[in-house]
Amino acid sequence: MTRHRLAISSDLAAIAALAKAGTPYPWSEHQYRGSLEAGHAVWLAEDETGLLAVAVILNAAGEAELLDIVVSPACRRAGLATCLLQQVIQHLKQAGATRMLLEVRQSNAPAQALYAHLGFRSCGVRKQYYPSANGLREDAILMEKQLG
Ligand SMILES: CC(C)(COP(=O)(O)OP(=O)(O)OC[C@H]1O[C@@H](n2cnc3c(N)ncnc32)[C@H](O)[C@@H]1OP(=O)(O)O)[C@@H](O)C(=O)NCCC(=O)NCCS
């Protein structure tokens, strides 16, 4: 059975290993530690086999931002990201957040489909925002969801 909980510092190595296995642009353990230390909510999904997914959320002044999400490659298209983000959104609403934002690479169709599935709408573009392969850069699509 999948459980959700907030990460603690002893989870950081496993989180960084999941990210490395799960995305071509992984956060480092140092970046996840920085998020924990900054007070971001680092949410985990896990079962008896171990860590399945991570999502990092910044919530300030009623506005939340999804900073990172990775699901283990072996566990995709099983609703894990949907479940985790629905739980996160529930917590954010209870904490008084009224809007949630995120940025996603223009080329990342799976993530954009996930966010649309959860009710996020595209609200802008940040040109050449992300570094990508061969020294090139890639646009970020901004997406938002009203939580109120
Ligand atoms: C994007 C990601 C988090 C999705 O996680 P997931 O657990 O597989 O997503 P879900 O199973 O909850 O998918 C929910 C819906 O999103 C859409 N979706 C998810 N993955 C998709 C894909 N590869 N292709 C098309 N649609 C997809 C579908 O509408 C899906 O519903 P369906 O399976 O009933 O059709 C996962 O692919 C991932 O970790 N990718 C690498 C890291 C990454 O890109 N993070 C986002 C950075 S902005």
Image (cartoon, rainbow, N blue to C red):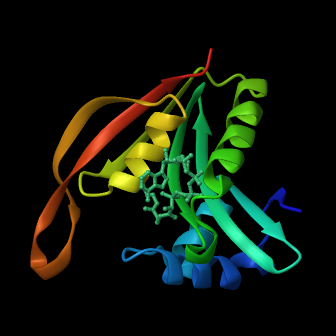
Which picture quadrant has residue 43? bottom right
Residue 82 lies, in percent from the top left, at 63, 46
Residue 35: % across, % down = 59, 62
Q: Is residue 27 above or below residue 5?
A: below
Q: Look at 89% across and 76% down and name the residue there.
A: 48
Q: Is residue 128 left or right of residue 1?
A: left
Q: Residue furthest top?
A: 148
Which residue is pictured at 33% across the width and 53% down the height?
Answer: 109
User: Where is 141 relative to 16, above or below?
Assistant: above
Residue 103 x %, y % = 37, 46
For residue 37, above or below residue 133:
above
Quadrant in which the N terminus is drawn: bottom right
Give the residue displayed 32% in from the left and 57% down from the top: 108
Q: Quadrant of the C terminus?
A: top right
* The image quarter in which residue 90 lies: top right
Residue 13 visible within the image: yes
Q: Position of residue 22 (x, y in %)?
A: 50, 76
User: Residue at the spot x=57%, y=59% of the render?
Assistant: 77
